[in-house]
Image (cartoon, grey):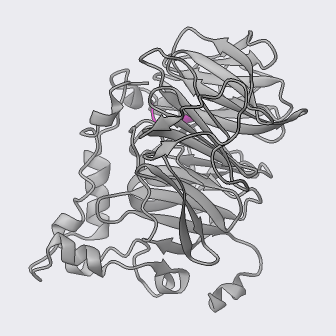
Amino acid sequence: MSYEGVDQMDYMVDEGDVADSADEANLDEYDLLMQVTDTSASQARKGKDIQGIPWDRLHITRQSYRLTRLEQYTNYENIPSSGEAVDKECKPTKKGGIYYDFIYNTRLVKPTILHFQLRNLVWATSKHDVYFVSNYSVMHWSSLSQNLTEVLNFSDHIVPTERNPGTLTEGFTRTQLSTVAVKDRLLVGGGFHGEIICKCLDKPGVSFCTRTTHRENAITNAIEIFESSSGLHFMTSNNDSGVREYETERFQLLNHFRFPWPVNHTSMSPDRKLMTVVGDDLDGLLVDARNGKTVSSIVGHLDYSFASTWHPDGRIFATGNQDKTCRVWDLRNMSAPTATLKANIGAVRSIRFSGDGQFLVVAEPADFVHVYSTRDNYETRQELDFFGEISGVSLSPDDESIYVGIWDRTYASLLHYNRRHTYEYLDSLI
């Protein structure tokens, strides 16, 4: 991935464009900001914009601004015109699926992004509990109690409270978070200089601090936490071309696999036998998780990939790329993807299969999250449509909730959707 990413935000349309379109009512941007409030499902049903954007007081309609965004948003590419070269490969899909219903948008939550290519900064550990990055902090939001709390401030001097072998006893100060993962009461944060910080959420303090390498270009691009036969493990994907696996009892390094290019994302198969490895190369790799040897190449994308995920059946996996596609692969025939799904405006930065395998959630860098039905062979999708950069998207472990972090100068917030069931009449009580 691009190392100088903190300064490369000019490829995006200015986040404040909607607010800057205020009409003659003499509302300056601060006044407009102060008037934006949370939005509930009942308010949205009565016509309120889910983000609280006052379209009736702007010079531009929502439909017109949507067309402007589609025309003007510039997708970041490492390979020029990669996003325009894939149209003929893409699977025709139709909108209209309704699998998740809007529940709430809270503006108390202020997600942020530090590196524009890394968007795995929101994690739901239950249908009510969400962890996300906000500036130097990891925060916790409870949609049940509407309570926001700081979990860990990475701008502080963080010193490990446990004396595990290999930990840096001096800790870190002002760690710039590039990525984070939260699962099973474990939080793992990764930094711009290869820092790894582990915190058990049911213990005070920090359990482990280490630096993966002292090489300059060592940013931690992604972290995945997963269950193994010996307990909870996590993997880091780094710009030094390494993938490292750690156990979490004493946080010891178990494996260190090296690849020919910077690794942007890695995901473990459900049976823990294979890994997808994608990064700064057109082709990804399918790797033996025990020894790091390549089992197969993943050939088809036209740019660099930043996302991967496995279907719970262990045969299907998907990859997300800057060529504006998410490609779905079947281990039984790796000669070509079984589906190539086209994004609307930008790279596919984050993807998730639901735990029951019925849905594939695909997040663009801004404005759109797509929920594809795997039962319909990815031909039907629900489109979540809003405005703002996406810091992350997360399904709750029970698949009941989807959370989307929105980073925006004026309309930063957390969108919450709930899975649709046959008892929607209860929504009238919300």
Task: Tell me if residue 325 is in the magenta stretch.
Answer: yes
Q: Residue 82 at x, y = what percent?
A: 40, 25
Q: Position of residue 364 (x, y in %)?
A: 47, 45
Q: Residue at x 24, y 64 (%)?
A: 18
In the depicted view, which residue is nearer to us: 200 or 36? Answer: 200
Q: Is residue 383 left or right of residue 318?
A: left
Estimate the x, y position of residue 47 in percent, counting from the top left.
42, 84
- Residue positioned 51% across, 60% down in the render: 384
Look at the picture and state if 144 lies above or below 227.
Answer: below
Quadrant of the drawing holding the C terminus: bottom right
Residue at horizontal 44%, vertical 24%? 1
Q: Is residue 377 visible?
A: yes
Q: Is residue 291 left or right of residue 277?
A: right
Would you say residue 307 is visible in this rendering?
A: no
Look at 75% across and 73% down and name the residue there: 421
Total marks shown come to 0
x and y, in percent, of residue 188 in the image: 62, 41
From this view, report whether residue 186 is shown above or below residue 140: above
Please name the predominant secondary structure of the magenta segment in the image.
Answer: strand
Quarter of image, res 317: top right
Work out which residue is located at the far right of the displayed protein and give it.
Answer: 229
Between 64 and 25, which is closer to the camera in this rendering?
25
Q: Nearer the viewer, residue 338 or 235?
A: 235
Question: Is residue 1 shown above or below 226?
Answer: above
97 left or right of 399 in image: left
Determine if the magenta segment contains residue 384. no
Q: Where does the magenta region start and end?
A: 323-327
